[in-house]
Image: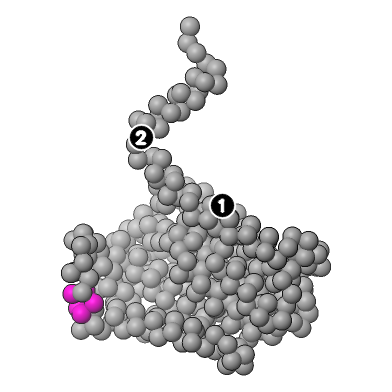
Amino acid sequence: MERTGPNARETGRARWALGHPGLLPRLAGRLLPILIALAALVGLVLVVHPRALAGALARFNPLAIPVVIVLTGGWFVLQGYRWHFLLRAAGSTLRAGDSVLLSVAGQVVTALLPLGDLTRAVFATEAAGLGVGAAAATVTVQELTFTLLLLLLAAPGMLALHAGTGVVLAVIVAVLAIFAILTVPQLFRLVRGGAALLPLPRRLLAQVDELQREASHLLRRRSTLAWSVVDLARAVLGASVLWLIVQVLDPGAIGWWTAAFVVAVAYVGGAISFLPGGTGANDASVVGLLILLGLDGGTAAAAALLQRVCFTGLAASLGLTSYLLARRRFRLGGLLTHA
């Protein structure tokens, strides 16, 4: 008689896993960043004391929730709208609505995995027929432009507070250096020559060459500079979300320019952490900066967690819905195959 009990099922799962030797390492690689991010959030709550956090959250007026959600949703829409013009410059024939749909669809992976934003590039290759290098260049250029504009937006708050000047200026210089490497052939050849001395696969160097060619093409177009105003608007929305949350929790605690400074520094901290969506590193930066600005730990943690819930919650819900629509429209591959 065939065994169908729990032990038999476990044995079947084990055999299936052994038959796919690469499965467990891939799952571990995908789950580890998520577990680290969740552990960072739990640690954040414990550090500021759960009772203080609960008291701060209880002060948040639910009437502000729809406004915060609309602003956050606008952040994702503007990201897709700006990306649309970069896709068009790279040769895409997608309509603006389709570009926004694919951009929002990619947010599911972005919220869960490091470097998940490159999922948008994969979607562009499947839906618009772009080459991998051209699609990756659109995402790279957008992220560089957005980061630079967000940091410039933080300058007034930075100057007023006399804080974080070195960090912000260092990142601005780094971003400008990347722009220069991508657009100045002599600089790129110098960097590329150094990279060629490292034990890197030739395929990787070929991909870097293609990315540089496509990114340089985009950055030399006037439309790339002109439509970067959309990235500026997205930066304004991001700062406004945090400012509104803090205003509801502790009216008058910080000004809008100060909120822009906090968002910029936290965004950079999250980006260099390589955690999914910057979760943990971004939130810890927000809490630390808000405490330095005079907020109590409970209020600072509440602001960071509410901001996280808004962005990650919408990224997951809107992203999954958009992916299901985009998959049906463009016959995209499975979501996990892009991770």
Give the residue pinned by disc 1.
321
Q: Amino acid at mark 1?
A: Thr
Residue 288 magenta? no
Query: In the shown orientation, is residue 299 left or right of residue 278?
Result: right
Task: Count residues near mark 1 (Cα–Cα under 10 Å), then give few for <14, some for 14-19, many for 20+.
Answer: some
Do the CB atoms of the residues marked 1 and 2 lie less than 8 Å apart?
no
The residue at 28%/69% (across/down) is: 211
Q: Indicate whether 253 appears above or below 96.
A: below
- Give the percent coordinates (x, y) of residue 163: 58, 87
- Give the percent coordinates (x, y) of residue 216: 29, 78
The residue at 40%/29% (across/down) is: 16
Do we see residue 201 in this rendering?
yes
Do we see residue 98 in this rendering?
no
The residue at 74%/60% (across/down) is: 50
Give the residue pinned by disc 2.
20
- Give the percent coordinates (x, y) of residue 20: 35, 34
- Which residues make up the magenta segment? 189-193
Specify how the rendered protein is coloured. Answer: one colour
CA separation in Å, label 1 and label 2: 30 Å
Q: Amino acid at mark 2?
A: His
Of the pair 321 and 272, the residue shown nearer to us: 272
Query: In the shown orientation, is residue 255 left or right of residue 11?
Result: right
Could you tell which of marks 1 and 2 lies nearer the N-terminus?
2
Q: Tell me the quarter of the picture where residue 318 sits.
A: bottom right
Q: Tell me the quarter of the picture where residue 174 sits.
A: bottom left
The residue at 45%/50% (across/down) is: 30
Number of marks drawn: 2
Task: Count residues near mark 2 (Cα–Cα under 10 Å), then give few for <14, some for 14-19, many for 20+.
Answer: few
